[in-house]
Amino acid sequence: MSNWVEFLPLLLLVVIFWFLVVRPARARQQDFLRTQSALVVGSEVMLASGIFGEIVTVGDQTVELRVAPNTVLKVNRQAVARVVETPTELPESGTGSDD
């Protein structure tokens, strides 16, 4: 019984390490893989550098983005930080009363 109690602090450190380091890293990796699998032509994305663009072509290692008319950038696929969701169009709200 006393041998088990001696290993309790070490076990506690392993559990804390798991919750503070391993689980968040695994969640980030899964989120990154979901983002990479969601890359399709026509999607609007944001690069890690903050540049926004529309995907023109998707390759195994690279993505071509249209960032302005007649301007296409070829970037590493891993540079894509997130796919930008296009906001749904909200109905116009009046600023004054209709009296």
Image (cartoon, grey):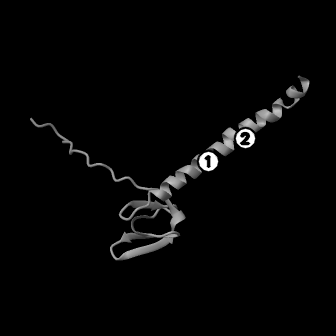
Which of the two discs, 2 and 1, labels the residue nearer the N terminus? 2
Q: Which mark is residue 26?
A: 1
The quarter of the picture where the N terminus appears is: top right
| Horizontal arrangement in the rendering, residue 41 relative to residue 2 (left or right) | left
Residue 16, compared with residue 36, is above or below; it is above
Quick one: 52 or 37, which is closer to the camera? Answer: 37
Between 51 and 88, the residue placed more toward the observer is 88
Q: Residues within 10 Å of mark 2 (few under 14, many from 20)?
A: few
7 in relation to 18, above or below:
above
Identify the image quadrant of residue 64: bottom left
Q: Amino acid at mark 1?
A: Arg
The image's mark for residue 17 is: 2
The residue at the far bottom in this view is 70
Q: Residues within 10 Å of mark 1 (few under 14, many from 20)?
A: few
User: Could you tell me which residue is drawn at 58 percent across and 46 percent down?
Assistant: 27
Q: Name the spot of residue 21 as percent of width and height, x first.
A: 68, 44
Separation of marks 2 and 1 at Cα, in angstroms: 13 Å
Residue found farthest to the top = 1
Number of labelled discs? 2
Question: Percent x, y for residue 2?
Answer: 90, 24
Mark 2: amino acid: Phe
Element marked by disc 1: helix
Q: Position of residue 81 (x, y in %)?
A: 50, 58
